[in-house]
Amino acid sequence: MSETEPATLPPAWFKHAFWRVHRLLHRISGGRFLWTPESKRGWGAMGLTTVGRRTGRPRTVVVGYIEDGSDVVVLAMNGWDEGQPSWWLNLEANPDAEIRLPGKETLRVRARRAVGEERERLWARWLEIDAENDEFAGRREVETPVVIFEPRPEA
């Protein structure tokens, strides 16, 4: 790609179908078919279960992640389309969730939005993996949240 050509995204139908297939594979395999940050992509795919803010029911999606020490970091990018993804809106209403990393047990976590220097540091880590993230994020009217999942203390 030349420097004058803008980065392109696949059409919305493809992005939605891609993640639906991943969600199906995640459910069938118990997460064994998801890639890890050690893959050539540099990021992994994990199962995320939130509580629906309207229904109160569990909602599971598959999202990309990186690890930052004992924390897991995700971009709430909605496929780089406008608006925030439903899972992020659910977490804003109830930050307690469960994540399933490839080859690991389900972890109980609490989500929070990174701000300030922490957000800048984590955004830079994502840019090391995919430099086009800045361009894609710049096309959105809303700032892309950087979401941190921290281990939840057991009661």
Image: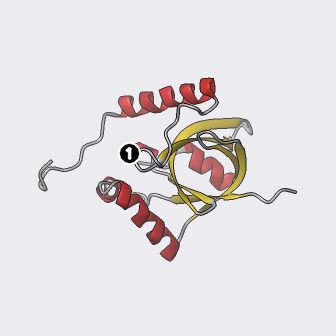
x and y percentages locating residue 149 in the rendered image:
63, 57
Quick one: which residue is furthest to the right in this view? 155
Query: What residue is at 55 percent from the left and 26 percent from the top?
Result: 25
Q: Secondary structure at mark 1?
A: loop
Q: Position of residue 23 (x, y in %)?
A: 55, 30
Q: Amino acid at mark 1?
A: Lys
Left or right position of 43 against 100: left
Above or below — where is 100 with respect to 123?
above
Residue displayed at 49% across by 45% down: 44
Residue 29's x, y, as percent? 61, 26
124 with respect to 132 (left or right): right
Q: Nearer the viewer, residue 38 or 15?
A: 38
Judging from the image, the colouring scheme is secondary structure
- Compared with 23, 113 (above or below) is below
- x, y (%) of residue 90? 64, 47
Q: Circle 1 is placed at which residue position?
A: 40
- Residue 94 to residue 36: above or below: below
Front-most of 142 and 147? 147
Q: Which residue does the image show at 50% across and 59% down from the upper left? A: 145
- In this view of the protein, can residue 145 be seen by the observer? yes
- Please indicate whether residue 135 sits to the left or right of residue 119 in the image: left
> Crowdedness of circle 1 by 10 Å Cα count: few (<14), some, many (20+)?
few
Q: Quadrant of the C terminus?
A: bottom right
- Residue 81, visible in the rendered structure: no
Quarter occupied by residue 60:
top right
